[in-house]
Image (cartoon, rainbow, N blue to C red):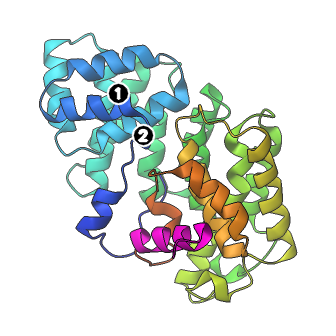
Amino acid sequence: MSPPPFGRASKRTERAFDPALDDTELASARTALAQGRWTAVRSLLAATGDDWDRRGHRITVLAQEPSTAAWSREWRLAEPESADAVVLQACAMVLRALNGKERPDHVRKACHAAAALVPDDPTPWLSLLILERATGRDEDVVRLFDEVRHRHPDHHHAHHLMVARLAERHVEAGQDPMHEVYDFASWAAEQASEDSPLAILPVVAHAERYRVLAAAGMEPRDAACGRHWTGRRARQVMKAAFDWWLEWERDDHPRNRIDLNFLAHAKVCEGRPAEAAALFHRIGPHATRAPWSYPDRDPYDAFHTARNIALGTA
């Protein structure tokens, strides 16, 4: 989960960005859950098994629905032995806590209880990481990231959370090419398997650092007017990520469209419309709020304007 854009999203924006992305089974189960039919979610999560990136994606998307906390409680009452119900409820409580609707200490206890039920599952630790990424101390964030990574070293969502948090450190360093967020992203990409989508993480780091610097007034709010995306290091990062995508793509990954949005955004900012166009074709209707909202833009307008220019339909 990337940090939210500045300001409130319009109703149009809320309709335009579906966190389920291209997972139609997830979207169907989410609709059923909103209607109180939690058995569809039970079947979905059972079928997901230990595909940890997909499980984390599905649970965090389901947890975003306002009624999930209540329906997951109903599920637990009906099936007290269901670990999936406990994990889902804990994640829903995390998101409620971030909206001021749950006490963080109660939420932490719920997540730890869920983790005890499924010791090999990184998802309860991911839920805690989502909470502490927004509210906790640096040492807590690092500790929770280590818990996730111990269970799934290439965990996609957890790495994105760490990059977003690290990018916010030492704003005063400005355009330091040695900033820790770049080191972390490069390390993660290098240690991952050859076909891992963490190869895109250095691009994500560049976007998250831009978000922070632009918000602080240290970069132009119009990315095309600054040098953040056109320096030597930026060009190397973008080329390496684009070359990886051409070779591997990983369309099977549940968060693939998130990576493609970050990469398309980078290519637009870099002034490479032909490469951006190829990415927009693959993104299709599955736009994401981040990074098009960075630093304080309407993501709907930003995405569609960039896509229309790249595709020559403006």
Q: Are marks 1 and 2 in contact (CB under 8 Å)?
A: yes
Q: Nearer the viewer, residue 189 or 313?
A: 313
Does residue 126 belong to the magenta stretch? no
Q: Residue at x 41, y 64 (%)?
A: 4
Which residue matches tag 1?
87
Amino acid, disc 1: Val
Say left or right for 164 vs 175: left
Locate residue 22, reporting x and y percent: 45, 39
Overall secondary structure of the magenta stretch?
helix
Instruction: Please tell me which of labels 1 and 2 falls first in the chain.
Output: 1
Q: Quadrant of residue 77?
A: top left
Q: Is residue 6 above or below residue 37?
A: below
Does residue 301 belong to the magenta stretch? yes
User: Tag 2, which secondary structure?
Assistant: helix
Q: Is residue 276 visible in the rendered structure shown here?
A: yes
Q: Which residues are magenta?
A: 299-314
User: Tag 1, which secondary structure?
Assistant: helix
Which residue matches tag 2?
127
Locate residue 68, reporting x and y percent: 21, 37
Q: Residue at x 79, y 69 (%)?
A: 234
Q: Is residue 269 above or below residue 133?
A: below
Locate residue 194, reporting x and y percent: 81, 34
Instruction: Give the distance between the C-alpha atoms of the residues marked 1 and 2, in whole angstroms.
Output: 9 Å
Q: Quadrant of residue 212?
A: bottom right
Q: Quadrant of residue 109?
A: top left
Neighbor class of circle 1 (other Cα within 10 Å; few <14, some 14-19, many 20+) is many
Q: Residue at x 29, y 18 (%)?
A: 42
